[in-house]
Image (cartoon, rainbow, N blue to C red):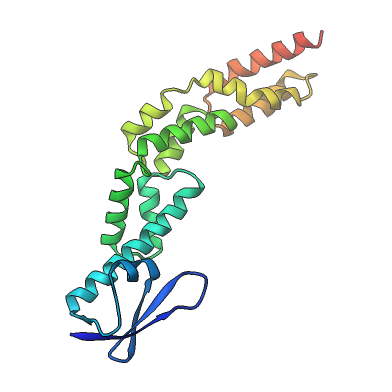
């Protein structure tokens, strides 16, 4: 057994407590964890109890890091796991935090895929294929991807993706117009048939508009 001989506030912005055992610095804890675990001077701790406390602290730190990461935008489960692994949190802490966040509805790959697809479609339309590729890179399962991108209509998305670009292109030469607009749509992942139909539609609409 080891005796707690001092609890001292850590330096820096984070509220941490330095734990001294038998007169020597042993480890530091989040202040919240130290309070929750009921640590006090002259308390005796077994090796098992020390391990419980440090595990609780790892979980708290891991959870806080995860919460900060998902605060910027929703994340897929694999994306979150990779982020936490890069922060060198123990595997058991990562598993526990991800499981807890899934219970709380904070990590949900189906909701994430829907968010990603709708956000892309609203602000930067692209093809089903390219949207699916982006979700695969985030580690989302194929079944969830197919459900999410199924809401997309490539013809409609291509038209919206091309409309602003087309209005700013010169319209004295169809081939030049087609090449530049086609390249733009190809970068958004659209296939030849959709590109060809979209270019012709906008060429005709814009030229009729100017008459």
Q: Is residue 154 visible?
A: yes
- When asked about the image quadrant of residue 126, the answer is top right
Toward which corner of the image does residue 162 lie, by quadrant? top right
- The image shows residue 87 at horizontal and vertical percentages of 40, 64
Q: Residue at x 73, y 25 (%)?
A: 176
Query: On the rendered structure, is 9 left or right of 180?
Result: left
Q: Is residue 51 above or below residue 99?
A: below
- Give residue 48's position: percent from left, percent from top: 17, 75
Q: Quadrant of residue 196?
A: top right
Instruction: Please identify the quadrant where the C terminus is shown.
Output: top right
Q: Is residue 73 left or right of residue 52?
A: right
The image shows residue 184, relative to residue 20, as above or below, that is above
**Of 196 and 208, the residue lying toward us:** 208
Horizontally, is 101 left or right of 51 in the view?
right
Image position, residue 2 (x, y; %): 22, 86
Q: Is residue 124 visible?
A: no
Question: Which quadrant would the N terminus be assigned to in this image?
Answer: bottom left
Kindly identify the residue that appears in the image at 28 percent across and 71 percent down.
Answer: 38
């Amino acid at each position: 057994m080891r005796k707690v001989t001092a609890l001292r506030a850590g330096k820096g912005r984070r509220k941490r407590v330095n734990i001294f055992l038998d007169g020597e610095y042993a480890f530091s804890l989040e202040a919240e964890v130290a309070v929750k675990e009921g640590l006090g001077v002259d308390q005796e701790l077994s090796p098992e109890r020390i391990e419980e406390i440090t595990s609780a602290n790892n979980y708290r730190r891991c959870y806080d890091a995860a919460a900060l990461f998902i605060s910027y935008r929703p994340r897929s489960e694999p994306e979150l796991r990779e982020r936490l692994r890069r922060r060198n949190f123990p595997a058991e802490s990562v598993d526990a935090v991800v499981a807890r966040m899934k219970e709380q509805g904070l990590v949900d790959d189906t909701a994430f895929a829907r968010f990603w697809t709708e956000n892309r479609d609203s602000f930067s339309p692209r093809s089903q294929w390219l949207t699916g590729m982006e979700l695969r890179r985030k580690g989302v399962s194929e079944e969830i991807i197919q459900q999410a991108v199924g809401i997309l209509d490539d013809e409609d998305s291509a038209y919206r993706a091309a409309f602003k670009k087309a209005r700013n292109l010169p319209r004295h030469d169809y081939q030049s117009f087609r090449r530049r607009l086609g390249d733009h749509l190809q970068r958004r992942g659209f296939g030849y048939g959709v590109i060809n139909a979209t270019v012709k539609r906008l060429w005709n609409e814009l030229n009729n508009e100017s008459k």
